[in-house]
Amino acid sequence: MKQLLNTLFVTSEDVYLSLEGENVLANRDKEVVARYPLHTLQSIVSFSYSGASPALMGKCAEKGIGLAFCTPRGRFLARVCGESNGNVLLRREQYRIADDDRRSCAIARNMIFGKLTNSAAVIQRTLRDHGPRVTDCGLEAGVSTIRSLQRQVLEQTELEALRGLEGVGAAAYFGVFDHLLLSRKEEFFFHGRNRRPPLDRVNAMLSFAYSLLTHDCASALESMGLDSYVGFLHRDRPGRESLALDLMEELRPCMADRFVLTLVNNRVVKPDDFQTQDSGAVLLTEEGRKKFLKAWQERKRDTLTHPYLNEKMSWGMIPYVQALLLARQLRGDLDAYPPFLWK
């Protein structure tokens, strides 16, 4: 269990939540392991299948305390709503901002700033850890190009121009991505981003990781009462979780790209974990997907210190904390959205 910004995250799969007076109790095997006064909480997010008592759900609805349920892997299941829990006001503000390009840009540019910062950090991590192996590969120039865009991004007030700067940064980043792959270059190479379908093993893993991360971001946003389909940078499109894609931008380099690099460089995945279809599409096999998902879940359990909150937490909690910070900014509790900046 982890309490952040008046939100209680229940990450233990076997914890059952119940009510005692004005307190929420965390129970394991019918024994109380923790208690939290309800008046100190704004919301509760449970990743446990054990659930919560009807009495607690009723009390949360009565007091306007958000109570959301997700699977242990982070998929959003449901949210308890009373007659009025503030979510309608939050979503109305989200929709108003989404309809205003300048206000949308003010949030989106912070997300893109985070993406550029984390992209540069991924490259710099390779330079730091494997300097002699990547000498004269253009990595320093890639970092320099990405860094030069950061000030322009923060000064941008137009969405189209912001998307253009993001594209320049992505081109510089993916232009050197192949040099970050240090193992079995004949089997695992990157000659450019391709998708729908992916045409090589690295792109197959990137696409799968992005799908998982989008899912985690959508679950996090819904858990905080936001509409994952209405974004600020990515515009409305039927069936597309645009706000989840927005939130994912800053997390792609450090949560998805770095993860794929680790799988390749540490020889976790093998060429026979992939299959090539007649169309040329390269996909993970069933065993390859199991191996990928197992490593993904293990990665999400690794811990780090959140750079903005200075709180220790697991990687899997990062999308939820960022969604919480975004909701706080939309409510006016924060002057600006603080992106996740990986160190």
Image (spheres, rainbow, N blue to C red):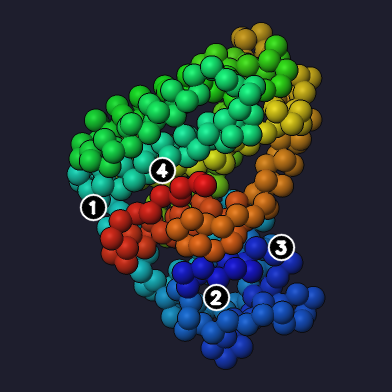
Q: Which residue is mark 3?
A: 13
For discs 4 and 3, the disc positioned in front in the rendered view: 4
Q: Tell which residue pokes out farthest to the bottom in this image.
A: 21
Q: Are marks 4 and 3 in contact (CB under 8 Å)?
A: no
What is the secondary structure assignment of the residue under circle 1? helix
Q: What's the residue type where badge 3 is placed?
A: Glu
For discs 2 and 3, the disc positioned in front in the rendered view: 3
Q: Is residue 250 above or below residue 167?
A: below
Q: Earlier in the sequence, mark 2 or mark 1?
A: 2
Q: Which residue is mark 1?
A: 96
Label 3: few (<14), some (14–19) or many (≥20) C-alpha neighbours in 10 Å: some
Q: Which residue is mark 4?
A: 114
Q: CA distance from mark 2 to mark 3?
A: 18 Å
Q: Is residue 188 left or right of residue 63?
A: right
Q: CA distance from mark 2 to mark 1?
A: 30 Å
Q: Are marks 2 and 3 in contact (CB under 8 Å)?
A: no
Label 4: few (<14), some (14–19) or many (≥20) C-alpha neighbours in 10 Å: many
Q: Earlier in the sequence, mark 1 or mark 4?
A: 1
For discs 2 and 4, the disc positioned in front in the rendered view: 4
Quarter of the figure with residue 9: bottom right
What is the secondary structure assignment of the residue under circle 2? helix
Q: Which residue is mark 2?
A: 57
Label 1: few (<14), some (14–19) or many (≥20) C-alpha neighbours in 10 Å: few
Residue at 26 percent of width and 47 percent of height:
106
Q: Earlier in the sequence, mark 2 or mark 3?
A: 3
- In the rendered image, residue 293, in percent from the top left (x then y), is placed at 70, 39
Q: CA distance from mark 1 to mark 3?
A: 37 Å
Quarter of the figure with residue 188: top right
Q: Is residue 43 above or below residue 206?
A: below
Q: Is residue 13 above or below residue 293?
A: below
Q: What's the residue type where badge 1 is placed?
A: Arg
